[in-house]
Amino acid sequence: MNVEQTLAAEHEGGPLLVIAGPGTGKTTTLVGRYQYLLSKGVKENQILCCTFSRKAADELKSRITAQNAADEKGMFIGTFHSLALRILKSLGTNIGLNKDFSIWTNYRERIAVIQEIQDRENIKTYFEKLSLEDSKPAATLAYIDSVREELLDAEDASIRASELGKKPELAYCEVYREYEQYLIEKDLVDFPRMVQLAVKALEQNASNNGSYIKKFKHVLVDEFQDINAAQKRMVDLFVSGNANLWAVGDDYQAIYGWRGSDVRYMLDFKNSYEGASVHALKVNYRSGRHILQAAENLSNHFLEGFRKKLTPSTEDTGAIYYDELSNEADEAQTLLEEIQLRLDAGIPADEIAVLSRTNKRPIKIASKLLQNGIPVDLKDGVLAFDSFNEKQLIQAASVASGVFLSFKWPRIPKDLYGFSKRLETENWDRKVKSLTTYISKRLSGSDTEDNKIKLENLKSTLLSFADANAFFSVLEATLNPSSDAKKVFVGTIHGAKGLEWDSVFLTGMEDGNLPQRQTTDPKVYDEERRIAYVGATRAKRFLFFTSIAENEHDKCEPSPFLSEMFGPQQVPE
């Protein structure tokens, strides 16, 4: 560790917030903190370490045990949900939870239960005057899950919805009540309920004798900028038992507000915890100077945050390019050529990434790369089709195109198989449209409209490919990735957070795409700016931005974030 990292890891005293910008060694410092506590005689079972992914938790355990004679079984290192589960197994019976409760993770089953509740006579009247979009079971479940992350029960959520005059939310709260009763009767705990119940159990323990809470002397929190209300409350309950809080993160990389995270918890750290300090890591071990400068220029436009200037550890300047292309097809062709140049220059495929704001933009690019023999690593839901009818359409298209699928999905009915075979001589466009119409006309049930929308969206995706081979090559790469070959990463910026590559291609830099423009809320717009910041700071030595002049619907303007990074007259060519 460098001096800054060592000071953070060996901090003595009150709560500490470590501001770790991109490439400054966040994980190294967190591991160093854990090792320092062990060296001071603190036992593994006295340290609670909260992460946001199983991968991060596993990496921490591996790095700690590799350098210390630590007892991995005694470690309390895990995601908030896995730690919540451990809490419920110890304290769940104190809040009325059955000892042999089951964890329920099947989203489709949860949706089916929500649909069944919405169809009940005493409930469906609440949905009669709502729009089709607001009446979807998925919208109801999303609302229920979100208010649980705020630690609101059905009654409190209903009171808030009533005060705000929000009819859809009032309807959702009626379902929430009966959904909770269903979970209680079936002894089920689903994921969002896990932290909610863990907080309830900890609160009960705190009001009793606090024996469980007081076991922990130190609480370490990774990615503190991403915590939500329920997770914050869980941390605070352990702090209330006199555990010392040590948190690390970067407010500039807070990009999960859409799922309940609130960067204010990080910004208000010193006001929330008595005697708290803030310490910044300022040496960047990742990016060239020009790349860091562009990122800093962008960060100067953030509405609020811990202002910081990162110092590069390398003399490498880093190359930055920008190209405005005619359309998405032109963008895909250009990226193919540029990526080939990087490969020819000796850059390994797994040191190259193509990143996008959404998971739809990379499809044409991934297809282009695969068709030209460049292996890709597809991430974050690129070509992820989950519904039964979507899979039926894809399989029917494979039959009509004479393509063998190596993965197993539910078989298509004989009549659909026969219809697909009769389309073998038709072109790709005709096959896709005919099969979509055939399946849509035979849909039935309460979710017919929702399934029709999904099929129409899938049809648009299929038609974005030149032919069957182009589509199925990408699908196979998604569902059956080979583990041995080095591949170009293709995914979203959200999925790239925490990762780094020598060369990064940041696509879709148009106003309306990045930033998206669904709302005029300044905080939401600022999060879009932070998403661009995260994307740019994944690059070590080469950063290439692209935008298009026109999409299939309208003309496009370059993202305002480009001029914030480089000035209106200084955008690189």
Image (tube, rainbow, N blue to C red):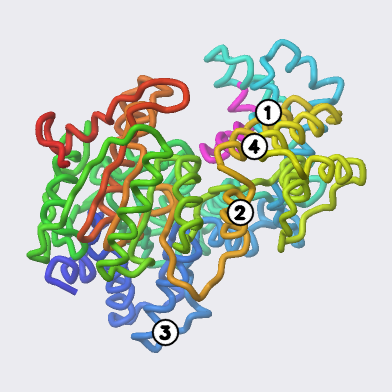
Location of mark 4 (residue): 458
Q: Nearer the viewer, mark 3 or mark 1?
A: 1
Q: Are marks 1 and 4 in contact (CB under 8 Å)?
A: no
Distance CA(mark 2)–CA(mark 1):
21 Å
The quarter in which the C terminus is drawn is top left
Start and end of the magenta stretch?
142-158
Q: Residues within 10 Å of mark 3 (few under 14, many from 20)?
A: some
Which badge, 3 or 1, is on the more N-terminal residue?
Answer: 3
Residue under the point 55% across and 48% down: 381
Dot 2 lies on which element? helix
Q: Which amino acid does the dot numbered 1 rest on?
A: Ile
Residue 373 colored in magenta in the image: no
Residue under the point 91% across and 41% down: 415
Q: Which amino acid does the dot numbered 2 rest on?
A: Leu
Predominant SS of the magenta segment: helix
Location of mark 2 (residue): 475
Location of mark 1 (residue): 453
Location of mark 3 (residue): 70
Can you say whether 70 is above or below 228 in the image?
Answer: below
Quarter of image, res 255: top left
Q: Residues within 10 Å of mark 2 (few under 14, many from 20)?
A: many
The front one of 119 and 384 is 384
